[in-house]
Amino acid sequence: MSQFLEDVLKGLSAKEKYLQSKYFYDANGDKLFQSIMGSKEYYPTKCEMEIFTQKTSELVTVLTGQNKEFDIVELGAGDATKSVHLLKGLLDNKVTFTYFPVDISANVIDLLQNELPKKLPTLKLQGLNGEYFKMLEKAKTLSDKIKVVLFLGSNIGNVPLEKAGDFVTLLRQHLKPGDLVLIGFDLKKDPKTILDAYNDSCGFTRDFNLNLLRRINNELQGNFNLDNFYHYPTYDPATGATKSYIVSKVEQQVSVAENLFDFSEGESIFMEISQKYTVQQTDELAKQTGFEPIHHFYDTKKWFLDAIWRCV
Ligand SMILES: C[S@@+](CC[C@H](N)C(=O)[O-])C[C@H]1O[C@@H](n2cnc3c(N)ncnc32)[C@H](O)[C@@H]1O
């Protein structure tokens, strides 16, 4: 049984049904995520892009102030539209490095391997298709240089707050003293601005969530009728958790690889969390898990933080 099928059956059999957001990204999911990033409501990409385009030389200075030669491992690289500015800045400054983009989507890695050399012909690049930590280990076997890990786009937000410490501890265990992490955090702000970002008026986020049901239909012999479900995002300003659900409009039965699942009217499938942080919370997270925060980069609105942490 594939890991995808095993995880889907486990999630749909749970008392409170859920699906894992890492499975959003088939070729169609990758495309829809790009549309989300381009939507007027989805501010995180624009804020982080501002940091990467307006503060490139400061980023280069802080990263190269620590080490002159290193590898860049980008976890969940996606289309690398932001990191490409940093990569160019490093190349312009004649810094020696290899770029290892890691992504669970094979489509993403193929795309990066085809497109990046056109934009940055001198870039040393090796794409790694697979899970974050497995591929980080692989990068370590390919080169023993200091690692600069990029974890952008608020990917850390997809880990629930109570598990973020475990996740970052695990990241630390895969690294050595002196290695660096450049990690993006979406910061707490006006709750309406946050909720709108997960409920864009063009419906890209809705389609992105429903696309996972389509992927299950295509790849796991599912028979979800997408018209019988709707997308329901929530934001709790007290905890900082944005959660996305898919809700059943009717009482219905769905089959996945010959396994039957009953849905009552109004029953939900939990799809994804996107946790928002205060700056203080991010500093505490670093210090509690073996990192030292050494620099904070913000956009002009101070809606997004790219923090640089050093492994101690
Ligand atoms: C929200 S997108 C962000 C992309 C990019 N970092 C950015 O900031 O625009 C998340 C990316 O992480 C990848 N991803 C999600 N979970 C992953 C996992 N467990 N291991 C490797 N890649 C993963 C997805 O395929 C997707 O390309």
Image (cartoon, rainbow, N blue to C red):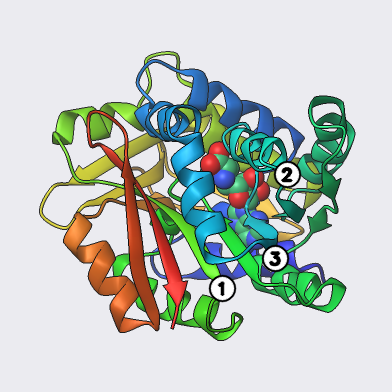
Left or right side of 140 for 133: left
Q: Report the mark closest to the observer, 3 or 1.
A: 1
> Which disc is residue 131 wearing?
3
Q: Amino acid at mark 1?
A: Asp
Residue 280 position by quadrant: bottom left
Q: Is residue 224 visible?
A: no
Residue that badge 2 annotates: 94
Name which residue lies at 50% across and 19% down.
38
The kind of residue on which mark 2 rests is Lys
Tell me the residue that label 1 is attached to: 179
Looking at the image, residue 126 sits to the left or right of residue 307; the answer is right
* x, y percent for residue 47: 37, 30
Earlier in the chain: of badge 2 and badge 1, it is: 2
Q: Of discs 2 and 1, which sits in the foreground?
A: 2
Respond yes or no on whether mark 3 lies under 8 Å from ligand 1. yes
How packed mark 3 is, by other alpha carbons closer than 10 Å (few <14, some 14-19, many 20 or more), is some
Looking at the rendered structure, the secondary structure element under dot 1 is loop
Looking at the image, is mark 3 or mark 2 earlier in the sequence?
2
Q: In the figure, 284 relative to 93: above or below?
A: below
Query: In percent of the image, x 52 and y 67: which residue is there?
Result: 180
